[in-house]
Image: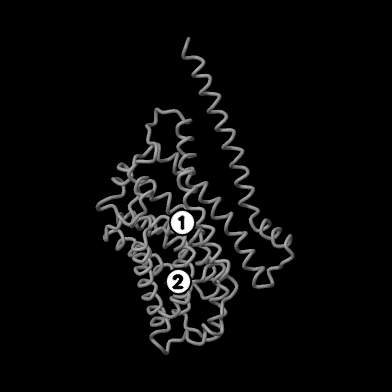
């Protein structure tokens, strides 16, 4: 008899959690589906339009900031619940050793069907790390998601045909897979920030078995959001703020002037120029088309495109809260090397 009130209280609390999650999910979906309208409203309320550089930059900031924060909160909450089923040791065991290569391929392939820009891919990257997924595997996803997604492939197919789209797909996946494998072999887990290492080692997370009630799982998801989002959000604001400041100021004539096949340094110069900029695949394709129309070489322009969407400075700022500078530099160096090879291959083949 003494157990009955406790069971009733648990049932009531579980129902409250489910109702709350349902309501928040509806609000989340409504907010995510009206991001453009929200940014338009903010811009109109301060008397600006997207036809001006400052208006375009602010619109970008007011669109991308809530998008990334919504993605981060939702994914981290789900990963917190999932962690209650899988301890880090079990997750790492599933993806370790000889299966790491398979994990890299799967993670890179997952990136194709996730239409994220580099900053939007960071939340899922953090979720993978917190679930104990090997570092190299998570990097394969982080590289592939912005660089090789269906938006980029469809636009490239429409503009340049299936051969260019297929070659971009193959080389882009190769960069993501090989870069992840290289980073994984370097064993750089010690260059994760301490709070990420603690989560990976299970020191700040709750791990339970299937027999434990859902209240504990929901609370674990909530705590996961507090621990991660509470630490990362200032870096998200700083990173997107930088991207918004640069957005809309693309000097196409200047870039096209040295993006030909005649000089060997055109590809590395294009990569260096692309890193400070920030947009997604859909946003960069019109710039790619404009540069090609001005006589730039396809390989050089695609290397520039890859650098913009896979090695953006805003992404590095956000990652700084998760990774130590040496790991960020290694990530940038390995991916940049792959992008350079892609640029040279395209220029040689096409």
Picture coordinates of residue 33 (x, y %)? Answer: 63, 52
Circle 1 packing at 10 Å, graded few (<14), some (14-19), many (20+), is many
Q: Residue farthest to the left?
A: 97
Q: Number of callouts in the render?
A: 2
Name the residue that disc number 1 marks.
122
Q: Earlier in the sequence, mark 1 or mark 2?
A: 1
Q: Can you say whether 165 is above or below 100 in the image? A: below
Closer to us: 350 or 95: 95
Which quarter of the figure has residue 20? top right
Image location (x, y in percent) of residue 337: 35, 72
Task: Categorize mark 2 by other alpha carbons within 10 Å: few (<14), some (14-19), many (20+).
Answer: many
Residue 80, x across and y down, in percent: 44, 41
What x and y, as percent, mark residue 36?
A: 65, 58
Q: Is residue 235 above or below residue 261?
A: above
Q: Is residue 189 left or right of residue 58?
A: left
The residue pinned by badge 2 equals 307
Please report the residue visible at 49 percent of the width from the left and 64 percent of the height from the top. Answer: 314
Q: Quadrant of residue 205?
A: top left
For residue 277, above or below residue 99: below
* Left/right of residue 61 with respect to residue 268 in the rendered view: right
- The residue closer to the viewer here, 160 or 31, is 31
- Label 1 close to label 2 by CB (< 8 Å): no
Q: In this image, 235 relative to 45: left or right? A: left
What's the CA distance linking mark 1 and mark 2? 16 Å
How is the rendered protein coloured?
one colour
Q: Quadrant of the C terminus?
A: bottom left
Please determine whether, in this image, residue 38 is positioned above or below residue 29: below
Question: What numbered label is drawn on residue 231?
Answer: none
Q: Nearer the viewer, residue 350 or 283?
A: 283
Look at the numbered disc 2 and give the secondary structure of its residue. helix
Residue at 48% from the left image edge and 73% from the top image edge: 305
Determine the secondary structure under disc 1: helix
């Amino acid at each position: 008899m003494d157990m009955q009130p406790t069971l009733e209280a648990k049932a009531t609390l579980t129902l409250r959690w489910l109702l709350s999650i349902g309501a928040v999910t509806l609000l989340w979906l409504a907010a995510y589906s009206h991001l453009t309208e929200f940014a338009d409203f903010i811009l109109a309320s301060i008397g600006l339009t997207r036809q001006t550089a400052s208006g375009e930059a602010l619109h970008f900031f007011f669109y991308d900031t809530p998008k990334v924060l919504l993605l981060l909160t939702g994914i981290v909450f789900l990963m917190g619940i999932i962690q209650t089923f899988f301890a880090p040791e079990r997750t790492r065991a599933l993806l370790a050793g000889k299966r790491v290569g398979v994990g890299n391929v799967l993670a890179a392939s997952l990136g194709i069907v996730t239409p994220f820009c580099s900053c939007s891919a960071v939340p899922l990257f953090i979720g993978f790390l917190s679930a104990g997924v090997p570092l190299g595997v998570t990097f394969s996803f982080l590289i592939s998601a912005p660089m090789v997604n269906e938006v980029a492939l469809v636009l490239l197919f429409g503009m340049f045909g299936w051969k260019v789209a297929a070659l971009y797909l193959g080389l882009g996946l190769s960069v993501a897979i090989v870069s992840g494998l290289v980073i994984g072999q370097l064993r750089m887990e010690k260059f994760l920030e301490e709070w990420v290492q603690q989560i990976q080692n299970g020191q700040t997370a709750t791990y339970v078995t299937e027999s434990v009630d859902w209240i504990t799982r929901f609370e674990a998801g909530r705590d996961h959001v507090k621990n991660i989002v509470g630490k990362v959000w200032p870096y998200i604001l700083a990173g997107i703020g930088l991207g918004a400041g640069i957005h809309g100021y693309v000097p196409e004539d200047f870039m096209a002037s040295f993006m030909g096949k005649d000089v060997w340094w055109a590809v590395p110069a294009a990569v260096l120029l692309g890193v400070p900029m920030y947009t997604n695949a859909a946003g960069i394709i019109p710039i790619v088309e404009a540069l090609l129309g001005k006589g730039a070489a396809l390989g050089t322009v695609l290397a520039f495109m890859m650098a913009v969407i896979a090695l953006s400075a805003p992404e590095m700022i956000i990652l700084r809260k998760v990774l130590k500078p040496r790991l960020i530099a290694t990530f940038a160096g390995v991916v940049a090397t792959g992008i350079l090879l892609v640029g040279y291959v395209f220029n040689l083949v096409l």
